Amino acid sequence: MGVSSFVLVGALFIYLVSGGRWTLVSLVVTVYFLAKNLEKRDGASSERHDNVSSGKIIASVAAAKVAKVAKVATAATAATTTVANVPNEVDFTLSFKPKSNLLSERIKAKRVPKIINAKGKKPTKSLSPTLKSVGSNSWLNSNIIIFYTTLTGSSQRAAEKLYQKLSNDINLTNKPKLLNLDDDVNDLDDYFVNVPADLPNLVYILVLPSYDTDSPIDYFLETLQETFNDFRVDKYPLKKLAGFSVLGVGDSESWPERFCYQAKLADKWLGKLGGRRIFPLGTICMKTGGDNRIEEWINLFAESLKDDTPITLNNNRNNDDGDDIEEIGSDNDNDNDNDNDSGSGESEGTLVDVEDMGKMIRESSSDSSEVDIMERREIKEMVAKDSPTYKSLTKQGYTVVGSHSGVKICRWTKSALRGRGSCYKFAFYGIKSHLCMETTPSLSCSNKCVFCWRHGTNPVGTSWRWQVDGPEVILKGALEGHYKKIKQMRGVPGVVAERFNEAFTVKHCALSLVGEPIFYPYINEFVEMLHEKHISSFLVCNAQHPEQLNALGKVTQLYVSIDASTRDSLKKVDRPLFKDYWERLLKCLEILKTTQAHQRTVFRLTLVKGFNMTDVNEYADLVARGQPSLIEIKGATFCGSSSGNGNPLTMQNIPFYQECQQFVRNLNQELQKKGFSYDIACEHAHSCCILIAQTKFKINNKWHTHINYNKFFQLLESGDKFNDLDYVSETPDWAYWESQEGGFNPEDTKYDRKTEKAKNKLAREQQQQADLI
Ligand SMILES: Cc1cc2nc3c(=O)[nH]c(=O)nc-3n(C[C@H](O)[C@H](O)[C@H](O)COP(=O)(O)O)c2cc1C
Ligand code: SF4
């Protein structure tokens, strides 16, 4: 009989003999509860002892502990966090703070860490299973790559800070790397499908902002998701990493519901792809926490690298909400040979120091319901008015039309308005620049060409995933935007009144500018509307969308950009998003030769020194495949330094005109050697541009590369079939290759900015001299 039973019987006895006195009874009952409590503690201690000796810690006890610590930590978080309404924020300060008086630390200090292996033995060496599985003995031996993406610079600053910290303050064996996901990573697969094999113990750290408008982060996340769903590739490619961590920056005040949602999604997908999270997801509000909190996360992360004690792994792959914490006490010891490299700890031996890690794991694991809500996002606008892309494009002089189109007047339009000459398209095809509108119905592109003037801000994607504006809205908006910019030119000195008036009736539309026009789902309708207004269409596509190219209706001139002649160099120059970019290009060339053979087709080659100015033989082979009517070869233009805009080109990559001429001679020779009927027809030295044409355009020994636009519309409206030779017109002599004028219309005034500047300077100096006398 236990103490409590004895007391109970005693209480009953007293009640009976005392004639029902309650005072005495309550005294006895109090004694009874005290005794009961004593009994409970006895039992618990013996139960724990039993479990340890049998080599097991009951999972429910562990779970209860995790929950308890998480509760304590959550309370602490609530007290310290400045961000309200942010359900999934991780206050990492509670997780890795080395020396502090945090509650969780105090709890830890009082108790001996519970690191116990399956056999009930204390491990001889507390080596992290994460490290062990990748064959390393310290995080300091890791190869760390910091990836970031940014639109307004804060993530870049954070990534650079992290890079500095890891490079200077920590004794890493290997120097970390810092890579911009948009500009330094040509192919995401190189890192997120095929983990670089030459870098052992790889750790990825991602610094990501969040945008509820379209941004390159969408593409990154989609790629991770696609990889996960792609049955052709390993489902868990990131298990080869030693670990990963994500630092998110966002704004919890303005986007409380979506605070750092893309960092959370990245954290989730990296886990699902087999990555092991080695440090909690950081979510920093740039408004309320800013640089200080970024620094805090960085310091804690750096500290954690010095600490090789075990890390709790949760099964990211199967369970998004992170509840599936590895069972405590499974075999972690060095004598265990069951080390099966299984990704995020699915069956790895795992040591758990619950006090340290419980909260961290719970909070850093993406909350599935929240992430799911975020993933079921509405269709975004490609370029929303409040987006950084919008700001950047408008700053560069673009008028954003609707949500995905743009228009801009180019420098040649301005030049022509001032009677100073048109662009090469006037010399080659008779387009007067002041009558030409440059626009695109899709600011998004599926390439990231090194020479592109988009300054790294335009949206990218392989499929249309945005809201769609109607073609009439785009055309109306584009014309309005164009005319508005023309109107602004009226005060510019030298504008010729006659040309200014003419400019309000656009005659030609260059569908190029930036982005990929045939990406737009209603491109045919848009082109038809141009033609109805007797505006000719010059459509440039990047040879990455064979399906759309195949379905394209009649245009005045159809361009395909051929930026390199081999698979490898195309990848280097165009940095395509499609994995099968080369096959797509070849398919497009086939389409030019077959379905689209009725069009007046042009290959456009943009020459970049050091990238694509060799391999003329291979270029000639591509010409044979596509059999274009014309080949336009143009030297790349320099559009700013590499530092700010992700454009890797320097002035060294911009070829001199003589170099372009030499390339064209070589290509022409190669074409003729192979028996193809091409010859060099025109040049526009000022634009560093040269035209090779099929010799069928040389009629009666005169080049006919110009276009008879009236004839084109007549033919189009007749409904009859027609081809490239049916609407030609004679090329003026001054546009001929090696002509004295070099493609410059003698009727225009040649304006040499340098000479003019020197002349003005001289005039000013002479005036000053005269004033002195
Ligand atoms: C148009 C726009 C949309 C944004 N959407 C979100 C959002 O959904 N969630 C969030 O946490 N922050 C959002 N932000 C805030 C940015 O993530 C924050 O300013 C961040 O510091 C930007 O990082 P970056 O400078 O590296 O581009 C948004 C900011 C802008 C301008
Ligand atoms: S295809 Fe054109 S718009 Fe697209 S990235 Fe290349 S140059 Fe820029």
Image: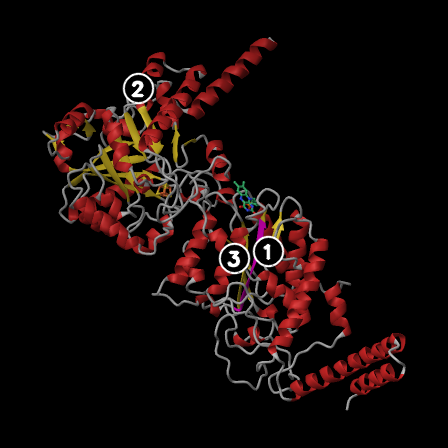
**Residue 88 tag number:** 1
Three-letter amino acid code at the position of disc 1? Asn
Q: Nearer the viewer, residue 35 or 371?
A: 35
Across and down, in percent, residue 394 comes to: 47, 32
- Which residue is disc 3 drawn over? 369
Label located before the other in sequence (3 or 2): 3
The number of callouts visible is 3
Q: Quadrant of the C terminus?
A: top right
Q: Earlier in the sequence, mark 3 or mark 1?
A: 1
- Please, what secondary structure does the residue beneath circle 2 have? loop
Residue 771 is inside the magenta segment: no
Front one among 32 and 49 = 32
Please say if the residues under marks 1 and 2 sit with CB atoms less than 8 Å apart: no
Determine whether, in the image, residue 621 is placed left or right of residue 175: left
Identity, as a three-letter code, of the amino acid under mark 2: Thr
Q: Residues within 10 Å of mark 3 (few under 14, many from 20)?
A: few
Identify the residue under disc 2.
505
Instruction: Tell me: 134 left or right of 515.
Output: right
Range covered by the magenta-colored residues: 242-249
- The three-letter code of the residue at mark 3 reads Ser
Q: Is mark 2 within 8 Å of ligand 2?
A: no
| Left or right side of 642 for 534 | left
Mark 1: secondary structure: loop
Residue 356 is tagged as none
Which of pointers 1 and 2 lies earlier in the amino acid sequence?
A: 1
How far apart in space, not on screen, are marks 3 and 1 (Cα)?
11 Å
Viewer-closest of 310 and 11: 11
Residue in the foreground of this view, choosing between 269 and 563:
269
The residues tagged by marks 3 and 2 sit, at their Cα atoms, a distance apart of 55 Å
Q: Residue placed at 28% from the left, 33% from the top? A: 526
Give coordinates of residue 497: x percent, y percent: 36, 12
